[in-house]
Image (spheres, grey):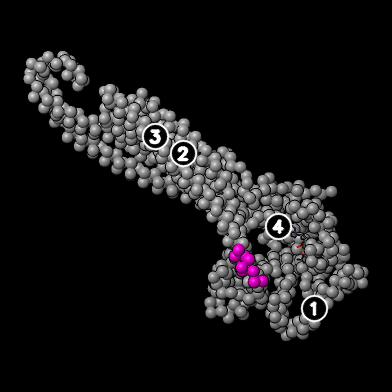
Amino acid sequence: MVNNEIGHRRPEKLSSATGELKPTGGVMRRALRYLSRYRTQALLPYVFLTIATLAQLAVPRMVRNMIDAVTRGAIADQVLKALERIPATFINQALPRILDVLNYPTTWDLQQLRDRLSQDVSHAPGDLMRAAIAILAFAVVRGLFAFLQSYWAERNSQAVAFDLRNELYAKIQRLSFSYHDRQQTGQLMVRATDDVEKLRLFLGQGLLQLVGAIILLTGTLILLFSTNPGLALTTLWILPVALVLFAVFSRISRPMFTRVQQRLSELNTILQENLAGIKVIKAFVREREEQAKFRSAADRLMNQQIAIARLFTFLFPFAFLIANLGQATILYAGGQRIIQGLLTLGEWQEFSLYLVFLFLPIAQFGFIINQFSQASASAVRIFEILDAQSDVVEKPNAIVLPPIQGHVKFENVSFRYFGSGEPVLKNVSFEVQPGQTVALLGATGSGKTTIINLIPRFYDPTEGRILIDGYDIRDVTLQSLRSQIGIVLQETTLFSGTIRDNIAFGKPDATMDEIIAAAKAAAAHDFIMSFPQGYDTLVGERGTTLSGGQKQRIALARALLLNPRILILDEATSNVDVATEVQIQTALQQLMKGRTSFVIAQRISTVMNADLILVLDRGQIVAQGRHEDLLEESEIYAEIYSSQLLDDEAQFTADAVILPGD
Ligand SMILES: Nc1ncnc2c1ncn2[C@@H]1O[C@H](COP(=O)(O)OP(=O)(O)OP(=O)(O)O)[C@@H](O)[C@H]1O
């Protein structure tokens, strides 16, 4: 038995539509690695931040110097005036006490004291000026480095977002069909845009704020304790209280942020489906219901966001209460120490300012934790995609498929879609010689599309194997395999751009002559030339709208340009008129000539001309052979022939009549 190991492989982690996965520290470490790719550039904002924070920390000390200079000068002035009014005998008696109270050496005489007091008075304006200039200088340094820090942080985080978006896009492109079968487009879009933005915000701002807050907190504590350990101790109680407060808030808010992302994804899914299916909605007059569906999703998103806003309106009053209590403690305990002569006015003010610096980082921690929660929830959602394993993987030692002849062999191929119990294909075996045309016939859901999806490895068989020119298609590189297979599906997708770009989609370096030749063979040249801009006519979302038949012929030209040895066609001509049908029919025959072609047949002519007809019934080949033989041998074929194809006979006759002269 040939068991396909790859076919059994399932994605390790299924991307959850609900995003209920728990964020882990590991994902954030991994996200940080994206930042560390930028090495020195990634460190710059942290260097600037440290300088700006140190400048910020210096300011209260300058304020203290300023106040102390002013009070010293003012007190000296008053003492000088008092000394002039008191008789010298009294002063000389009390001099040692006076010197002691003023903190001067008790051995000084009156003249020395006077000189010193005059000096204090005359120095005060200079000290005041110097302190003011220092405050200004520190403010300038802080502002300048804060600017540099923000600029580089933004630059780096944008670079990370750029990398992540590109990686996500590349991965989404690489993931197999079965992954996309299970994913909602809206979900993928939110992950590639909004989730990347959330992670970027944390890497750009949150992380920097965290480091800034840690420096500020540590610096403040060191300065407080070095100034007055006793007073510092009295303020410390606010640290644990604030930490508990913010921890509680972050715990409550974290799941709320995850729910916001889910609601946003739901809203996007509805929006995306509605935009893609706008015609169906209008045709079935479902605008009102769809609007209601959208509105209710928008409502759920809004409610979730309001819930978060409500939570945070509670946080601020609490935070301010703690800050004010801290201030009150400082004012009271500091005031007492001043009365006892243990603290200067300047130190009192310095403490009061540093207290703000103590509280600020703690308040920031609350926000940073929330930002971290949001970012890690988003990172989980992003890495889920990046880690998703494609069901169709290229072997590490895959070889390049050499130019093929087009011999195709299915050996006992069975296939089951992910999540579906019953196999959709059972023991399918057939062989096609180079250049032959294979027509696939069968009731709807019998497995025709599934068979053709296996040839370019959009899915891998669950059992059995497929050989092209004797190569197991799982042993060759996807690029070399798919580039030799041309596919024209019923539903034609054109991309925004010119007609020329669309034809050259699979071979961008094609010359204009090659493009025109392909268009002529696909019976598309004439209608293309009827547009004023010819091959430069814009199509796609904002360009000229082409008819179904025109789009199909562009798709044919696109496949023809690749000159593939194997061709896969899903015949559908129901939406075109007889003349176009004939043109397409001719183009198709042209296209199939000399190539191994697999056609999901709708037309009797295709079936009658086919070298091999595969009749499918519930995933099994119930008959195979040529038309004449099958008509005699297979009851089921005769039935399909009469019920599904015979109706086309009139059409076929009409085509046949027109064809010779075409
Ligand atoms: N992506 C998918 N995931 C799960 N099941 C699928 C998927 N695509 C098709 N199926 C199931 O596999 C079976 C075969 O589908 P397939 O599209 O191959 O039939 P078909 O013969 O091409 O039908 P039709 O003529 O209607 O296009 C069906 O029962 C279908 O429901």
Q: Amino acid at mark 1?
A: Asp
Which of the two discs, 2 and 3, labels the residue nearer the N terminus?
3
Q: Nearer the viewer, mark 3 or mark 1?
A: 3
Q: Amino acid at mark 4?
A: Phe
In the picture of the structure, the residue carrying the numbered disc 1 is 648
In the picture of the structure, the residue carrying the numbered disc 2 is 365
Secondary structure category for the residue under label 4: loop
Query: Could you classify mark 2 by the number of other residues whose Cα lies within 10 Å: few (under 14), some (14-19), or many (20 or more)?
Result: many
Q: Say the numbered circle drawn on residue 458.
A: 4
Secondary structure category for the residue under label 1: helix
Query: Could you classify mark 4 by the number of other residues whose Cα lies within 10 Å: few (under 14), some (14-19), or many (20 or more)?
Result: some
Q: Nearer the viewer, mark 2 or mark 4?
A: 2
Q: Nearer the viewer, mark 2 or mark 3?
A: 3
Query: Which stretch did the figure color magenta?
Result: 284-292
Tell which residue pokes out farthest to the right in this image: 633
Q: Give the left or right position of residue 562, taking residue 99 as reference.
A: right
In the picture of the structure, the residue carrying the numbered disc 3 is 325
Q: Give the left or right position of residue 292, taking residue 606 as reference.
A: left
Q: Amino acid at mark 2?
A: Phe
Residue 548 on image: x %, y %: 65, 74
Q: Is residue 429 above or below residue 662?
A: above
Query: Could you classify mark 3 by the number of other residues whose Cα lies within 10 Å: few (under 14), some (14-19), or many (20 or more)?
Result: few
Residue 517 on image: x %, y %: 63, 74
CA gap, disc 1 and disc 2: 73 Å
CA gap, disc 3 and disc 4: 66 Å
